[in-house]
Structure formats: structure tokens, C-alpha cells
Image: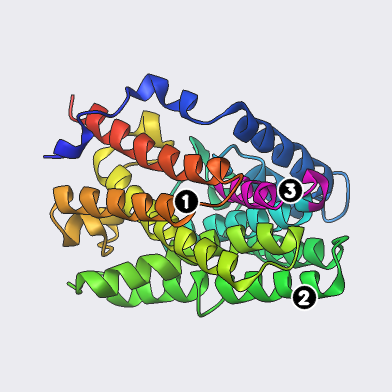
Amino acid sequence: MFSTMSSAKSVNAIGNQLSPLHEQWKQRIEKVLSERLPSVETIPQRLHQAMRYSTLNGGKRIRAMLVYATGYLFGADEKVLDVPASAVEAIQSFSLIHDDLPAIDNDDLRRGKLSCHRAFDDATAILAGDALLMFAFEQLSNGTQDAEQIIAMIRILSEDSGTAGMIGGGSLELEISGKSIAVEALEDLHWRKCGTLIRASVLLGAYGATIPNQDILSKLETYAYGVGVGYQISNDLLDSMGNFALLGKKPKSDWAMDRSTFYNQLDPELASLRMVELFNQSIAALDGLDRVEPLQSIARYIMQRTLSICEASKG
């Protein structure tokens, strides 16, 4: 099983796969979010505390990195990218808070700490998620970009977060839980559930920098599809084969909720191969463009991290 993992690096070396530039972007978004989120001293204090608790609770910040890395492709100043980067991270935090709720995934832990509804209560968690959703669009509306760029960013994030994207994917996942579905339908679900917010991150980076032409947009769309679906397959594999120390939450939670995943709907080896194929397609889509290494290395990082953790879990 998992013969594709033979060349993967050890888990201890995973952190070295991201460059100092990526680490710089990660530190930058942490600072930006800390500065822009409402203070715990501001009324309603408990709500603001819950928002900050969940949003500043660690995480890889892959989506913010994608914003900065795409903006880097266009030579954008990092300062103008802070707005879309903070917006997409707020949407991500909102989605995780609501996913963890008892009515959906019923997860008690997130990133090694109590999930929002466990650290506070269900009602506060619901409101904190709602508030982060509003915070994201407040950020975009206050951007320094031209009006055309701001409108494009608001449209992209709303569409990719809404019923045609992430939230719609969550609804479909609940509908098909416990059912066997075709691989093609499962991949479409993964695209909606995870991939569309990855696409939003990439396109927000593009429109946060400029009005991109259709040729580059097409290449970025192909890149985003590979990373978006590949990332969710990665999550499926890690949920099923990882462990608490590596994941920061209880493994096999999707199994406990009888969710349809690539791991339980497809042979694990084939799921791994499909993930690698998708990431390699995303990397190849950007060949020939300048300044794309930061985007390509994010795809390599997620892929190699997954392969390494799965390999380590066999020991």
C-alpha cells in the first residue's frame, strides 16, 4: 500500500519544504489578522474573543499563502494583498467553526485545541462564524484596489463560498453521507467543498494585484483545480491514516460520521495516485510563466507532506 511514498521525506523534515518567503507570508497574515480582528476589549467581548480564538488558533495558512504567491506572480506589493488574504482566512475560519458544530461534524478539537463551540458554547460559535463571514466582505470592501478589482474580488469570494461552492459542498456532503457514489461525483463534491475556496484564494491574489488576462486566468484556474481537489483528497487520506499528534484532531472523524471520502470510496493506493496526479497537473499548468515557483512549491508541499505523514503512520 502507498508505493508512491517511497521517496517521501520524513515527517520531521516536512517543515523545510516551504521557503523563507512562504514563512514570511505566514507570519505576515498572522500579524494582519491580529491587527484587523475586533479587540476582545470591544463589546460584544465574548463574541470577539471567540472570533480571535478560532482565527488565531494556528493553522498552515495555505489559502493566504496562495493569495500572496499569486500576487507575487504579478509583482504586487504585499500590502495590497493583505485585504484579500485576511478575507479568505476569515472565510476559512468561519467554515471550520461551523463544520465542528454538533449538528455537522461534531468535532471537539481543532488544531490540537478545543473547537470553538467546546471552548465557548454552540450559540457563540454560530455567531462567531457568522461574524467572520461578514468580516471577510468588510475587508474586501475597504480594499485600496480599483473599484473593478474590488467588485471582482467580492463576486469571486461570494460565489466560491456560497451554494455553488463551499457551503453548497457542505450541504451535498450531508445528503450523501453513508451512500456509495461514483468517483466523478465524489471529485465534484471535493471541488465544491474544498477546491472552490482554493480557487478563490488564487483569483483573489490575481485581482488583488491587477485585472488579469484570460490566458493567465485559464492557467490559474487549472492550477487551482488540481490543488483544490488534491488538497481534499489529502485531507481524506490524513483523516484516515494519520494520528492525533500530526493532525491536531481525532483521526477517522469522517469515518465516524459516515462521510463519503476518497479513502473509503476508492482503494487507498488509487486515491494517493489521483492526488499526486492532480498536484502534478497543477504544477505543470504554470510552466512557462515567470515568478510561479512560490505557487508551484505550495502544491509540492501539500503533496509531499501528505505522503510523508501517511508513510510515517504505517510504522
Query: Which numbered marker is on residue 287?
Result: 1
Q: On the image, which quarter does residue 245 sit in?
A: top left
Q: Nearer the viewer, residue 281 or 66?
A: 281
Is residue 176 something that shows in the picture? yes
Sequence-wise, the earlier of marks 2 and 3 is 3
In the image, 190: left or right of 5? right
Residue at image mark 3? 75
Residues in magenta, as a range: 62-80
Q: Nearer the viewer, residue 114 or 19?
A: 19
Q: Nearer the viewer, residue 97 or 224?
A: 224
Residue 294 in the image, given as x and y percentages of width and height: 57, 41
Taking the view exactly as shown, the residue that stands out farthest to the front is 288
The residue type indicated by label 2 comes to Ile
Residues at circles 2 and 1 in contact by the CB criterion of under 8 Å: no
Residue 256 in the image, given as x and y percentages of width and height: 26, 54
Q: Secondary structure at mark 2?
A: helix
Determine the residue positioned at 36% across, 42% down: 303
Badge 1: few (under 14), some or many (20 or more) residues near its Cα, within 10 Å? few
User: Which callout, 2 or 3, points to the residue nearer the camera?
Assistant: 3
The residue type indicated by label 3 comes to Gly
The residue type indicated by label 1 comes to Asp
Sequence-wise, the earlier of marks 2 and 1 is 2
Query: Does residue 257 lie above or below 18 as drawn?
Result: below
Determine the residue positioned at 29% across, 37% down: 307
Is residue 103 something that shows in the picture? no
Question: What is the CA distance from the residue labelled 3 to the residue labelled 1?
Answer: 17 Å
Query: Which numbered marker is on residue 151?
Result: 2
In the image, 42: left or right of 177? right
The mark tally for this picture is 3
Quadrant assignment for the N terminus: top left
Badge 2: few (under 14), some or many (20 or more) residues near its Cα, within 10 Å? some
Question: What is the CA distance from the residue labelled 2 to the residue labelled 1?
Answer: 29 Å
